[in-house]
Image (cartoon, coloured by chain):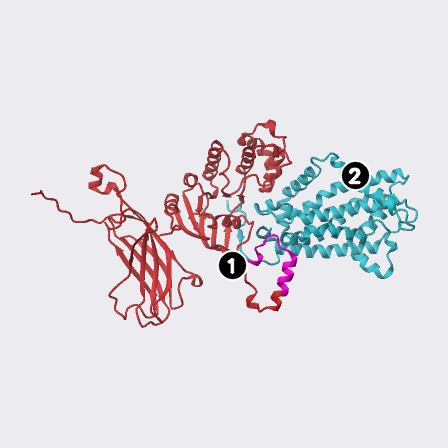
Chain colours: A cyan, B red
Amino acid sequence: MSARLPEPIVIRPGRGWLGLGARELLRYRDLGYFLVWRDLKVRYKQTAFGAAWAVLQPVLLMLVFTAFLGRIEGIGSAGIPYPLFALAGLVPWMLFSQSLNGASNSLVNNQNLVSKVYFPRLLLPIAAVASFLVDFLVAAVVLLIAMLIFGRVPPPTFLLVPLLGILAVTAALAVGLWLAAINVRYRDVKYAIPFVIQLWLFASPVAYSSELVPGQLRVVFLLNPMTGVIDAFRWASLGGPRPDVAIAASVAVTLAVLIGGIAYFRWFERTFADTI
Amino acid sequence: MTDIAIHAEDLGKQYRLGQHQDPYGRLSEVLYGTIRSALKARSQRHRGKDFWALRDVSFDIPVGAAVGIIGRNGAGKSTLLKILSRITWPTAGSATLQGRIASLLEVGTGFHPELSGTENVYMSGAVLGMRRAEIRRKFDEIVDFSGIDPIFLDTPVKRYSSGMQVRLGFAVAAHLESEILLIDEVLAVGDMEFQKRCLGKMDEVASGGRTILFVSHQLPMIASLCDHSLLMDGGRVVASGPTSEVIQRYQSGGGGNAASVAYPNEARRPGDGTLSLLAAWVENGAGEHCFEHALTDPVRLCVKYRVHERLDVTPQPSLHVTDNSGNYVFVTSPHGWADDLARMPGDYVAAVDIPGHFLNDGMYSVGVAVNHFKGGLQTAFFERGALSFNIVDRIEDNEMRAASRWGGRIPGVVRPLLRWQVEEAR
């Protein structure tokens, strides 16, 4: 009988480094599943186009980019039609920007849960970014179709696309953890995010090729984790030299920000219900 | 030996009011505040007032008990449940819980208006800590319990009536498998018939060996469900015991008090450095701490205090007895004490007997104070309503009343046994 008893739950004050709480996260994995499922179900509810939005958004942006930026000489990559070049940048970018937005607002959007029930709070930003992976896969299929239209056979490296999606989502989560925790206390974050995302778009090689960035700016440019993700995504889908340095930089920066983000998030987690 | 399901020790929760009160803080305020505080003296930094929503709360709840928590709004009941549910963290003390915890602080936690009834059952179940397989297994039972026609299950709950939402929400929660169930004022909604069904379910849960902590303003509900209760006031547990007694104390107003108080923690003892209160209690004739006393029996009130330094004049304890409407019945202090008594450092117990056949039946509250004369008259402490006791008129023990067959209460604050003379008029 006593073997069946779980270890007691001890509640005591104090902050401090709580660790990741991996065991608790695992115990609540079903809730994580349902949170993702709910976000997916609700996202395009009561919209006329429904899930078609997942397709429309990158395609419309691609058309705009092509119409206005595609005419600039040398903005894309040699030998790649600009619409494809833009779409291959937009697909990972949309994943990143939507995930970042979702993660940053995940706690505030779920106030009723945070203030009424216990569960590992990390589930909220994680579920928020995970739900956009589905949109991403749909968008990747759109890219695939566009490639076929332009007469390009997808290379075997295209199979790496899901992996790159996970990298993009992890980068969004890393930054989103910070912003989500700050957002609980300062709603400035909510208004700052769209602006930050816009700036970030210009700082990432979505509409232009990263070869255009001059040498002295290159180091700063590589600190942006999306540089590596987008370059790698273009390499995986459209070919060209593999951007090893950019990928390595992206992974390193993402991991550093992620570890800091988890620590920050967990540090303030105990005050969420009181301040939200 | 009974196993303890919930053990709370000196739990406290402090909120800071003032500058940090604004729930939607703005960065500019903080930046401004930081600059300002950097320029000002450190002592002025925390101008916000501290507020203890919960203070020194200690109790043990045995496995399988159903315990009610009652008290006025703002007494700390919900804060206590939130801490035990791990939604918010205590500022002081600790709590140990043995077993899986499910808390129900609102009905329909996790419901999303756009999702259908079926989907929300899964969603809410998962939020409350159920596994997917567990929900699937109990799904039919849950729907059945809610009494919702299955044809509505595919409709988004935003089209449900509020009553239907409540029923579905509670039905999910009622099927939680946990050793400890924490419930906050959730049954106030819903129709009578459904409330009864919920009570039945909770009764079943409690008799199934699970521990329930139940907050409600609906005293009859507490009475029917919980054998024991805690009464909270001002963030503290001011009484605990059999529910009927606790409810009586609560209804008697005066904040509700226990028949004995003790201040084991030196930092939190009432007092002024010269003298401090250690404990106070109400005793019966056998020397037992006792809340209820027969009208015919004497009641002894005791104050235990500590004198910290040598005093020139004997300090003066006093007791302030009020009835349950707050009217003063009397104030009493010792008189004729020798000046060499109880003025050396040490612990003292002052006691006074209220004779039997003096107070009428009813609840009384006792304020405990000690004055000393170091540098003029000083009140070391005055704890209003520190104690309370109940005088009962046991009709069956009273020959005359038993013979009169009248069971109503005889009015009056006092019921002295006075000498009468009856003689034939000339």
Q: Position of residue B169 (x, y in %)?
A: 56, 37
On the same chain: label 2 and label 1?
Answer: no
Kindly identify which numbered label has been placed on residue B333: none
Task: Tell me the residue at 45%/53% (across/down).
Answer: B234
Q: Which residue is mark 2?
A: A55
Describe the element under mark 1 as helix, strand or loop: strand
Residue A166 showing in the rendered view: no
Task: Tell me the residue at 47%/52% (across/down).
Answer: B8
Query: Disc 1 marks which amino acid?
Result: Asp
The stretch of residues the image draws in magenta is B17-35
Whole-angstrom CA distance, mark 2 to mark 1, is 53 Å
Residue A178 or residue B333, whichever sits in front: B333
With B244 as the anchor, is A36 left or right in this view? Answer: right
Q: Is residue B88 magenta?
A: no
Question: Which chain is disc 2 placed on?
Answer: A
Packing grade of label 2 (10 A; few <14, some 14-19, many >=20) is some
Q: Please tell me whether mark 2 or mark 1 is closer to you in this view.
A: 1
Q: Position of residue B379 (x, y in %)?
A: 36, 64
Q: Is residue B21 magenta?
A: yes
Q: Which residue is mark 1?
A: B50
Tag 2–tag 1 contact (CB < 8 Å): no
Task: Tell me the residue at 62%/62% (across/down).
Answer: B33
Residue B80 showing in the rendered view: yes
With A51 as the anchor, is B195 left or right in this view? Answer: left
